[in-house]
Image: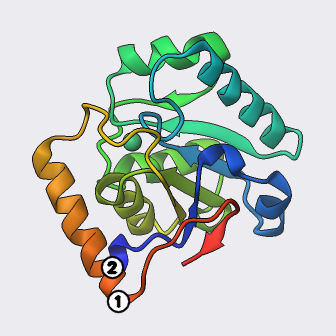
Amino acid sequence: MSIFRPKYTIDTVYNLNPITLKKMDIKTVFSDLDNTLVAWNQKQTLEKISQLRDRLSKHGISLVVISNNKHERVNKVLEPLGIEFIASAKKPFKRNLVKAMAQYGVNPVESIMIGDQILTDILAGNSAGMQTVLVKPLIKSDGWHTWLNRLVEKFILGCLNSKEKITYQEDLHEQ
Ligand SMILES: [Mg+2]
């Protein structure tokens, strides 16, 4: 079960503090897209992504999106912002995360995988030996999950919570 447990939690990806990440020696933040960075294609949300990228890059930390979604969809959101991404990442398999770390020249311990799903983002990040961060989904039902996915996710969360409850705070919080 520990492979499913996030190393950290935070209310939202937008609360990530570059100073805290610096202290943790983080060089790259690999982030999920749907329900982590965007709920809808709102202009306001897009500005928030740019601001996050700028805030991190001021401290030498890069933001790279790793999404299971198709290239076309991810490109449509991120291309105008000039944010780098890997689409069709096939999380929970770690293969594309390992490739991405090699591509950006970072070690697993210098990398964060942040996302809203234990079954994909956290499992993939933990398998790749990265620092994993679970966020609250931006919206409860995003249409990308199937009911089965939600059910399994709920079951795993229940198991993890029965051992030690997963809680969220405004800042990065160790689990
Ligand atoms: Mg997601």
Quadrant position of ligand 1: top left
- Amino acid at circle 1: Lys
Residue furthest front as drawn: 140
Q: Along the line of sight, which residue is nearer the eye, 22 or 96?
A: 22
* Residue lying at 76% horizontally and 60% vertically, measured from the top left: 21
- Amino acid at circle 2: Leu
Q: Within 8 Å of ligand 1, the CB of disc 1?
A: no
Q: Along the line of sight, which residue is nearer the eye, 81 or 37?
A: 37
Local secondary structure at mark 1: helix
Q: How many marks?
A: 2
Q: Which residue is mark 2?
A: 160
Residue furthest bottom as drawn: 163
Q: Which residue is mark 1?
A: 163
| Crowd class of label 1 (few under 14; some 14 to 19; many from 20; radius 10 Å) | few
Q: Along the line of sight, which residue is nearer the eye, 114 or 125?
A: 114
- Quarter residue 103 falls in: top right
Q: Within 8 Å of ligand 1, the CB of disc 2?
A: no
| Crowd class of label 2 (few under 14; some 14 to 19; many from 20; radius 10 Å) | some
Q: Is 131 drawn above or below residue 34 in the view shown?
A: below
Residue furthest left as drawn: 148
